[in-house]
């Protein structure tokens, strides 16, 4: 009769150990679950947001640690579209990268002469002179898979467009949407990816102040 309390105590200790194991396993499982990135809403308020899907995978800006060899690791950089002595031929560019996650992608959008709100059709990108004013409207995408140095994809004529919905030089706000296909630089005939659901809402003065 005296052995009962000892057996009950052993059984109770076993249950405590089992419960602790379950809690630890559950905690580890939660840590392994990756929170999926979400696209920001389409706005025209100068919120300095950007998002798109590259072949269905969401890309949003994510800052990384600055590097002496790599250069800027800022997730979102936008050019001042009303800079220079001739505002009629204002340029506009956005460079976005995910510098945090392994295999994070990169995208570059460029309009060499932004004059008014409207649709800007993309042309052929050489991938080498993105800032020159004699370049057409174009896009460059670098897709990473975590194993290679990245695959470069370039826009082509008729592949899509960037739509500027707000171009406010007084409040320094530019916002719009975009959608296009790009072709692989080294294999343009057989490798194409789609960029969809693109949106941006930039206050270029405030964004530059934050750098």
Image: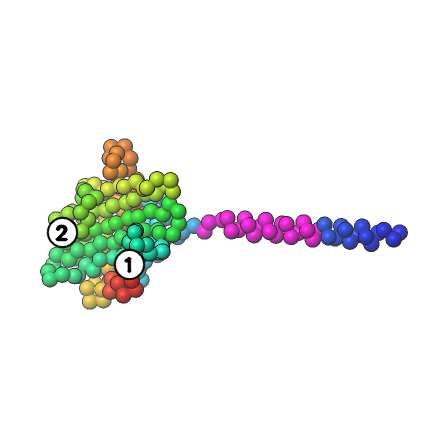
Tell me if mark 1 has few (under 14), some (14-19) or many (20+) residues whose alpha carbon lies within 10 angstroms of its own. Answer: many
Q: Position of residue 101 (x, y in %)?
A: 39, 49
Relative to 10, 75 lies left or right: left
Front position in the image: 137 or 17: 17
Is there any visible trace of residue 199 in the rendered image?
no
Residue range (magenta):
15-35
What residue is shown at x 32% (from left), y 51% (from top)?
97
In the image, taking residue 33 as reference, residue 39 lies left or right, namely left
Give SS at disc 2: loop
- Residue 124 appears at what percent x and percent y? 18, 42
The answer to whether residue 56 is above or below residue 79 is above
Q: Which residue is mark 1?
A: 201
The residue that mark 2 highlights is 133
| Residue 156 coordinates in the image, percent (x, y) | 21, 41
Location of the C terminus by quadrant is: bottom left
Residue under the point 26% across and 63% down: 208
Decide which of 58, 131 is in the foreground and name it.
131
- Looking at this view, name the residue that lies furthest to the top: 190
Q: Residue furthest bottom?
A: 170
Question: In the image, residue 5 lies at what x, y percent?
Answer: 82, 54
């Amino acid at each position: 009769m005296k052995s009962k309390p000892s057996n009950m105590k052993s059984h109770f200790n076993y249950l405590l150990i089992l419960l602790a194991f379950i809690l630890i396993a559950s905690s580890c499982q939660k840590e392994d679950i990756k929170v999926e990135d979400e696209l920001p809403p389409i706005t025209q308020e100068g919120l300095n947001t950007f998002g798109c899907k590259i072949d269905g995978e969401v890309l949003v800006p994510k800052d990384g640690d600055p590097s002496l060899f790599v250069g800027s690791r800022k997730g979102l950089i936008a050019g001042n579209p009303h800079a220079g002595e001739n505002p009629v031929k204002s340029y506009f560019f956005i460079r976005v990268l995910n510098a945090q996650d392994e295999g994070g992608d990169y995208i570059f959008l460029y309009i060499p002469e932004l004059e008014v709100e409207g649709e800007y059709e993309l042309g052929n990108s050489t991938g080498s002179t993105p800032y020159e004013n004699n370049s057409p409207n174009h896009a460059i995408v670098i897709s990473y898979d975590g194993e290679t140095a990245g695959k470069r994809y370039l826009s082509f004529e008729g592949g899509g467009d960037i739509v500027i919905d707000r171009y406010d030089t007084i409040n320094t706000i530019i916002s719009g949407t975009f959608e296009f296909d790009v072709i692989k630089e080294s294999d343009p005939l057989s490798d194409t990816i789609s960029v969809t659901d693109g949106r941006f809402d930039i206050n270029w003065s405030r964004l530059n102040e934050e750098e």
